[in-house]
Image (spheres, rainbow, N blue to C red):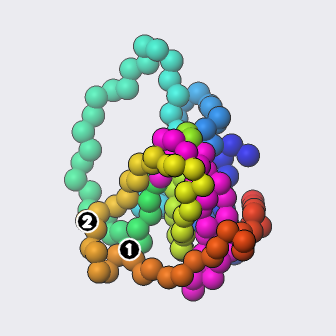
Amino acid sequence: MLIERIVVQNEVLAIIIRRDYSQPGIQFVTPHEFSQQLAYMKHPAGKVIEPHVHNIVHRDVTYTQEVLFIKRGKLRVDFYDTTCKYLESRILETGDVILLASAGHGFEALEEIEMIEVKQGPYIEHEDKVKFRGITSSNVIWEKGRE
């Protein structure tokens, strides 16, 4: 599956765009209401994207969503519900992109990893997240909630 939505009890936890995904044009993979919008774009040489500016639009962001771009390596992503209960895991590899949309998540680098993270700011260190004890590799569940 080249675009995978991890959904548990009708809640989108994450959307993964695998490195081999390819479609012409612009393909938004997020619903319009997400505070972080993610699209895949593929255009031929010579395609002109009209110059533009973005208007100031005040938005109310109440939940941090983040996007990881895996530049190099292999990463296990563990998904948790909002009560910190472990649900399932996926592996991301070089070139994969993931939008972490809701609930909890943790990571283990399975190989040396280089990645880029994009999320809303400003970051408020003592209010932005709650850390908890995650699973170990012997407890991994793969692809339980695939849609």
**Amino acid residing under circle 1:** Thr
Whole-percent x, y for residue 137 in the image: 67, 68
Prevailing SS of the magenta stretch: strand
Whole-percent x, y for residue 138 in the image: 72, 71
Q: Is residue 18 left or right of residue 128?
A: right
- Which residue is tagged 1? 62
* Residue at figure coordinates x 36%, y 68% from the top left: 61
Q: Which mark is residue 122?
A: 2
Magenta highlight range = 68-93
Q: Nearer the viewer, residue 135 or 119?
A: 135
Residue mark closest to the camera, 2 vs 1: 2
The kind of secondary structure element at disc 2 is loop
* Residue at figure coordinates x 34%, y 61% from the top left: 120
Looking at the image, is mark 2 or mark 1 earlier in the sequence?
A: 1
**Amino acid residing under circle 2:** Pro
Is residue 20 covered in magenta?
Answer: no
Q: Nearer the viewer, residue 109 or 38?
A: 109
Q: Residue furthest top?
A: 46
In the rendered view, would you say 42 is above or below 16?
A: above
How packed mark 2 is, by other alpha carbons closer than 10 Å (few <14, some 14-19, many 20 or more), is few
Q: The C terminus lies in which quarter of the figure? A: bottom right
